[in-house]
Amino acid sequence: MPENRFILLEAGASRPTRVPLPPSMTVKAGTDDTEGRFSLMEVVVAQAIPRHVHHVADECVYVLDGELTVEFDDRVQTVTAGQFVLLPHGVPHALRPATTPPPRVLQISSPGGWECFLEDMIENRSEISRGGQLDPVALNRIAAKYRITYEETA
């Protein structure tokens, strides 16, 4: 029932997750909260997110603070505080911080599931990171479940 799904979070609060996420990732509305329709997170984009494709989910990013570099298809755009970008499913994109401190964003994924993918990444962090960088080959073993593909470089 819709009235049972009302959520009010205090400033800085996060919805519970299956595994603890880093403080730079807070879930405001999880996939279970929205009956799978979307997930909403506040994220500090502290490291580059390699080029990848969401085969099902559209991704929306609203920059709260700082600047975010977005590579979308064959374009590169700097998105600043107050700007919004829609990254539709099926189109390759990458994200990276363009400022110090790194940008803080609201990220919406529709349908939901993004926080579930992040939980799986955290559980497998020693397997997916090489020298402080995400390893796309290892990451794809987890991402496949969520219909996401990271570009693997030679």
Image (cartoon, rainbow, N blue to C red):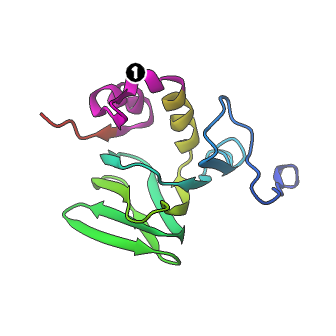
Residue at 29% from the left image edge and 39% from the top image edge:
150
137 falls in the magenta region: yes
Tell me what residue is drawn at x 48 percent, y 23 percent: 124
Number of numbered discs overlaid on the protein picture: 1
Q: As drawn, which residue projects farthest toward the bottom?
A: 82
Residue furthest right as drawn: 3
Q: Is residue 43 left or right of 92 when viewed as pictured?
A: right
Image quadrant holding the C terminus, namely top left
Q: Of helix, strand and loop, which one carries label 1?
A: helix
Residue 152 percent coordinates (x, y): 21, 36
Name the outermost residue toward the left.
154
* Above or below for 95 versus 17: below
Residue 140 location, quadrant: top left
Name the kind of residue labelled 1 in the image: Glu
Query: Looking at this view, is 153 or 53 the one in front?
Result: 153
Q: Is residue 47 magenta?
A: no
Q: From where the camera sits, is residue 140 visible? A: yes
Residue 63, placed above or below residue 18: below
User: Does residue 82 lie above or below 28 as drawn?
Assistant: below
Q: Position of residue 114 (x, y in %)?
A: 53, 43
Report the residue marked by disc 1: 127
- Residue 87 as seen in the image, left or right of residue 25: left
Range of the magenta residues?
A: 123-148
Mark 1 nearby-residue class (10 Å; few <14, some 14–19, many ≥20): few
Q: Position of residue 65 (x, y in %)?
A: 54, 70
Question: Toward the viewer: 30 or 89?
Answer: 30
Kindly identify the residue that appears in the image at 44 percent across and 75 percent down: 80
Q: Residue at x 46, y 27 (%)?
A: 125
Viewer-proximal residue among 74 and 100: 100
